Image (cartoon, rainbow, N blue to C red):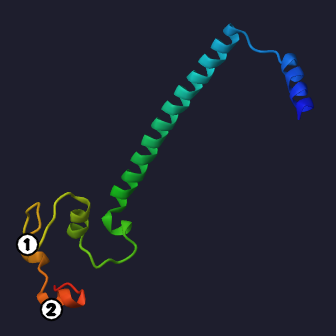
Amino acid sequence: MIQFLKDAIREFRHVVWPTRKETQKFFTLVLAMLVFFGVYLFVASNIFSEIIFGLKNILGPESTTSVSSSMSQDEIDALFSQEVHIDGDHDDTMSGSALEVSEESTATGEVAQ
């Protein structure tokens, strides 16, 4: 183990470390490449998204759902919105009558509907 450490130290003496100027040059190069590729990926992603949404609009909403669903588009939209709709009620809170539990159902652990 001690021999390994001595060999490692001896190898470190052979390393040619970059100068301050070289380090600054390489840092600037790496930073510029990161910015370039970041902007490139941002632009390419936005262009690709516009193409996909454009194709979706051209093809229409019928072709976007290949699996038939029992939910209407309004119900799906309501799931993704912040509003809660109960029995046509457009309040943001749920009414107490919607969540009533009968006395006999509490004994069995079931919720009345």
Q: What's the residue type where badge 1 is placed?
A: Gly
Viewed as shown, does residue 91 lie left or right of 80?
A: left
Q: Percent position (x, y) of residue 109?
A: 24, 86
Circle 2 Cα neighbour tier, 10 Å, few/some/many (<14 / 14–19 / ≥20) = few
Is 64 above or below relative to 43? below
Viewed as shown, does residue 43 lie left or right of 22?
A: left
Q: Residue at x 61, y 23 (%)?
A: 30
Nearest the viewer among 59 and 78 is: 78
Q: Which residue is mark 2?
A: 104
Q: Residue at x 32, y 77 (%)?
A: 69
Nearest the viewer among 70 and 104 is: 104
Front: mark 1 or 2: 2
Q: Percent position (x, y) of residue 60?
A: 32, 62
Q: Which residue is mark 1?
A: 96
Is 14 above or below relative to 44? above
Is 9 above or below relative to 24? below
Give the mark nearest the N terminus, 1 or 2.
1
Q: Percent position (x, y) of residue 92?
A: 11, 60
Q: Residue at x 65, y 13 (%)?
A: 25
Is 99 above or below relative to 109? above
Q: What's the residue type where badge 2 is placed?
A: Glu
